Amino acid sequence: MALAINDTAPDFEAETTEGKIRFHDWIGDKWTVLFSHPKDFTPVCTTELGYMAKIKSEFDKRGVKIIGLSVDPVASHEGWAKDIKETQGFAPNYPMIGDSDFNVSKLYGMLPAAVSGDPAIRRSARPRTTKPCATSLSSTPTRKSSSFWSIR
């Protein structure tokens, strides 16, 4: 079943670059933007994550939390953060979820339920790789908007 506007956002536990979280607890009473990227070290994703780090203070001013997701493990995100800093001038200053079991990607409809395998051998150009997505959640936490886009 697809997640629709005003549905309660799925809760989950996940490892992030800032430690383990339970998503609804992490959200607290804030609005949140969850955005995903198909794989670490991809050029478009690298520029987007650097840009989000650059403008994070604007989200902070508005009481909005941001959190990223990639199907690669947290250890890979740490190396990617260094690359983002080097190439974009800003390193991610928000948590990045390591979704190597695809749990969060499946909960939010970014991947079909049948997807499995090792994310390390997946390529972002494969049609089964997560769709880049941004989902905004209110403090309740209900889904308020969602955007999916395709990089070809």
Image: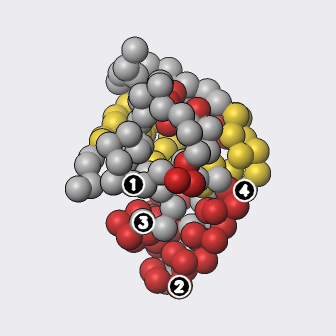
Q: Nearer the viewer, mark 4 or mark 1?
A: 1
Residue, disc 2: 86
Residue, disc 4: 18
Q: Which mark is residue 27?
A: none
Q: CA distance from mark 3 to mark 4?
A: 22 Å
Measuring from the top left, give residue 114's x and y in whole percent.
Answer: 47, 25
The one nearer the camera, 45 or 53, is: 45
Residue 58 occupies quadrant = bottom left
Residue 40 seen from this side: yes
Residue, disc 3: 42
**Which badge, 4 or 2, is on the more N-terminal residue?**
4
Q: Are dots 1 and 3 in contact, CB under 8 Å?
A: yes
In the displayed structure, 48 sits above or below 125; it is: below
Residue, disc 1: 124
Q: Are dots 2 and 1 in contact, CB under 8 Å?
A: no
The local crowd at label 1, few if under 14, some if 14 to 19, many if 20 or more residues have their Cα within 10 Å, is some
Quadrant of the snapshot with the N terminus = top left
Measuring from the top left, give residue 103's x and y in whole percent.
Answer: 58, 32
**Which badge, 4 or 1, is on the more N-terminal residue?**
4
Q: Nearer the viewer, mark 3 or mark 2?
A: 3
The amino acid on which the numbered mark 3 sits, given as a three-letter code, is: Thr
Q: CA distance from mark 3 to mark 2?
A: 14 Å
Q: Are dots 3 and 2 in contact, CB under 8 Å?
A: no
Which residue is at a point 23% across and 56% down the rendered structure image?
Answer: 152
